[in-house]
Each structure stands twice: as structure tokens, then as C-alpha cells.
Image (spheres, helix red, strand yellow):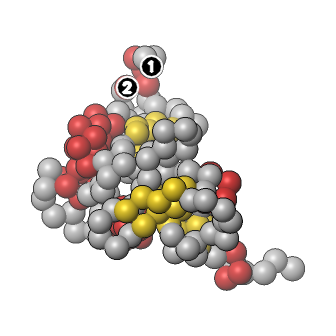
Amino acid sequence: MVPPEWLRPRGWPAHVWLGTTVENNAEATKRIPTLLDVPAAVRFLSCEPLLGPVDLAYALFNGADSFGTMPGIHWVIAGGESGGGARSAHPEWARSLRDQCRAANVPFFFKQWGEWAPMGQTAHEGFKRLHDFGDGQFMERVGKAAAGRKLDGLEWSEMPGMTAAERLAAVSPQLAPRRT
């Protein structure tokens, strides 16, 4: 519950961000429209645990073409599941979210792989449980710390309000402008 005055035009405080969890496309189509009805200063999606593909254009526009925009979504966070019963996230699901965000100029933050990492991404030794998605993509259960948070070799740490240079540095620190 929020104070009624927050729901008036320009009544939502700028320091209060509002988000919703979106694990897959089915949840996206249910939850994103509700999120967009709230006049929050910053609206974000927490796509974690990522349990299936998420087509943001479909969720935002009921299947209509988005023309590369995501009106009302200011940030997307994605990540795999951790814990004892963790299920694996397909790398293509995370890539798709990243690419949709890049096309719409929406900051993307890849939080973690969770317990599972793409096969061969880590130097984890010993017995590994494997998950086969059936499309040639294998994931290995290596634990959250070993799995890390790199997607295609980069840590994606973008946030709302960052300048273009700050967003570049958040993805590729070695490319950031040097401060003197």
C-alpha cells in the first residue's frame, strides 16, 4: 500500500523506485501492465530467477511492434536462481533481455548466473551436475560464487541515471575514460 497522494500525477516521490518480478513471458504479460499503471519515478523489472524467455515487446505492447522502445520501463535486472533447488537459466534468455534493453536504450544489469554456469565458463574442478537444454546448450552446477555474473565475458552493471560514458564503464571498465 502506498499513500493516496503518491498515485496523483507527479505525486510519486523521485527516490521511490518500483519494480516487479518477471521470471518468464507468462508472468511478464500479467505483471508489466500493472507496473505501468503506477506513476513511479523509476519502474524496473527483476527478471530473476530467469526461468524462461521474456519478450518485452509482447508484454509491453500486447504483441504490437515496439519500434525499439520500452515506454515506462527504466531498468531491467536479470539473473539465475540460487539455492538448493535452483533451476538453470538458458544463456540465450539473458542475451535476449540484454539485446532488447540495448535496442531500447534501457539500462541492463546482469546480477548472477545463480548456481549454474554455461558449460566451460568456469575453471570449476570436480564432479559437476549438468543440465541439457536440448539445443546444444549445457549448464553445469558449480555454485553461485564460481558461476559469477559475466554474460558473454562482460559484467553488465548499468543503472538508471548513468551517462553514456558511465554505462560503458559499467559494462567494460577497461574502456572507461581515465580520470586525471
Q: Nearer the viewer, mark 1 or mark 2?
A: 1
Determine which quarter of the picture holds residue 106. bottom left
Classify mark 2: helix, strand or loop. helix
**Residue, disc 2:** 7
Q: Residues within 10 Å of mark 2 (few under 14, many from 20)?
A: some
Q: Position of residue 60 (x, y in %)?
A: 24, 51
Task: Report whether 130 appears left or right of 114.
Answer: left
- Image point (69%, 75%), residue name: 173
- Image point (51%, 69%), residue name: 119
Distance from disc 1 to disc 2, alpha carbons, whole Å, reads 8 Å
Residue furthest out toward the right: 180
Pick the residue in front: 127 or 58.
127
Q: Is residue 41 above or below residue 115?
A: above
Please tell me the numbered disc located at residue 2: 1
Mark 1 in CB contact with mark 2 (< 8 angstroms): yes
Task: Report whether 166 appears left or right of 63.
Answer: right
Please tell me the numbered disc located at residue 42: none
